[in-house]
Image: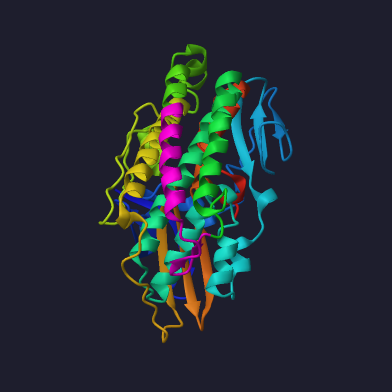
Amino acid sequence: MKILIGIISTSKGDKLYVLDDGQEMLINDDGKNQKDIYGNYSFLKKHSFKINDYPVTGPGVFRFRYGPVTSGIREAGVFQLYTYGEKILRATIDLSWKYREMAGTMQMTSPEAGLLMAERVCSNFAMSHSVAFSQSVETALEIKTSLLTKNWRILLLEAERIYNHLYVIYKLAAAAAQKVLAAHLSALFEEALRLNEQLTGSRYLMGINSIGRLNNNPSGPAVQKAVDGYKNLANTFTRLYEHGLANYNFLDRLHTSGTLTPDMAESMGLTGPSLRACGIKDGLNTTTSHLISLPVITQSGGDALARMEIRAGEIVNSCQYLIDHLRTSDSWIDNEETQIRKDKTGGTGYSVVNSPSGALGYYLNVKNGNVQDVNPFTPSYIGMHAVSHALEGAIFTDFPFIFDSFGIHFTDASC
């Protein structure tokens, strides 16, 4: 399965950044039938900050502006909702409120300085941005990282997945007025952040990763405490979630909300839980050969409930994955050295990681020791297009279930 995640402009013409069964590749854009091959080609080519910006007219139709600062939207972003009352006819999303020109700011900086900015694009996905950026630089400069670095990056990506998925399910429970469940999930979200801090010193896993290495190697006692912590978290979450699934009022609010068909999801280039909720595997759950790959969970509903079920299953899987690998010495004890070519000061690199909400990639060049032509490609930008489509035909009370179930962020989408 081939998924287009971005289009790169180069001096030799455009290149398509494609995932082929989870493996990234660059292919030349020959301009022939790309719209037919990739359903998201047109909007990735245009890359507008106003998504689905086509006004709707008709008897009684008016435009309702929701945002940039309002209840239910945790970031500065605007929805222009066209409606004649309760039904949403079209949802235009304006990402420009969070545009900070992060990619431009990274230009002509050292790789280390660029990495610091990359992990601040979106704090919820700090580790995903950090790993994708650093691996791109390492490819460009032919830096071979140690086993320690490879393993810890994989494990910390799973730690990031856990707290992000917990937050999404908490938001869905809160929107459905499940106050007791939401309170417990909020406490588990806080516990996941504390486990991050206990393991690495950072709640949002910032400042841990660096170019070719880790800045901070977790100690043995911290690792053992983390193992116990993830056991308790997985067990507590499983009990809570099973209790939540017994509440049909909660499930009814999510069932059929924001439904996408497999064809829709695939044509928009969705990856991650949103694609797997439509029964399609994206190939992103593979990892390095020396660690066991995560099992892939799929659902067939394509709605907010299916997206929540995917995330719930992945929380438990990621906890078990961390427990299993933190128990084994080769997950966190170094037995090979980083190899850095001192003579290499330039090159082209690109890398994709499996972020909590889908494929997150970077393409960049390194020239004379500085990064140039930085191109980030995020799941939130494609996810915003999916949200805009999923909102059409929904009623206003379904808005939070649809938007929150995709687990996307304006900061991530507008970088």
Residue 213 magenta: yes
Q: Position of residue 25 (x, y in %)?
A: 34, 62
Q: Position of residue 377 (x, y in %)?
A: 49, 56
| Most foreground residue, 284 or 157 | 157
Residue at position x 46%, y 65% from top? 134
- Residue 341 in sight from this viewpoint: yes
Q: Position of residue 363 (x, y in %)?
A: 46, 65
The image shows residue 396, relative to residue 121, as above or below, that is above
Q: How many marks?
A: 0
Colour logic: rainbow
Q: Position of residue 301 (x, y in %)?
A: 38, 26
The residue segment tinted magenta is 208-237
Residue at position x 41%, y 46% from top? 224
> Quadrant location of the C terminus?
bottom right
| Most foreground residue, 48 or 402 | 402
- Residue 14 in sight from this viewpoint: no
Q: Main secondary structure of the magenta part?
A: helix
The image shows residue 249, relative to residue 415, as above or below, that is above
* Residue farthest toward the right in the current orientation of the protein: 69
| Most foreground residue, 356 or 382 | 356
Residue 367 magenta: no
Query: Which quarter of the picture shows residue 239?
Result: top left
* Residue farthest toward the bottom in the current orientation of the protein: 343
| Most foreground residue, 336 or 175 | 336
Query: Which quarter of the picture shows residue 60?
Result: top right
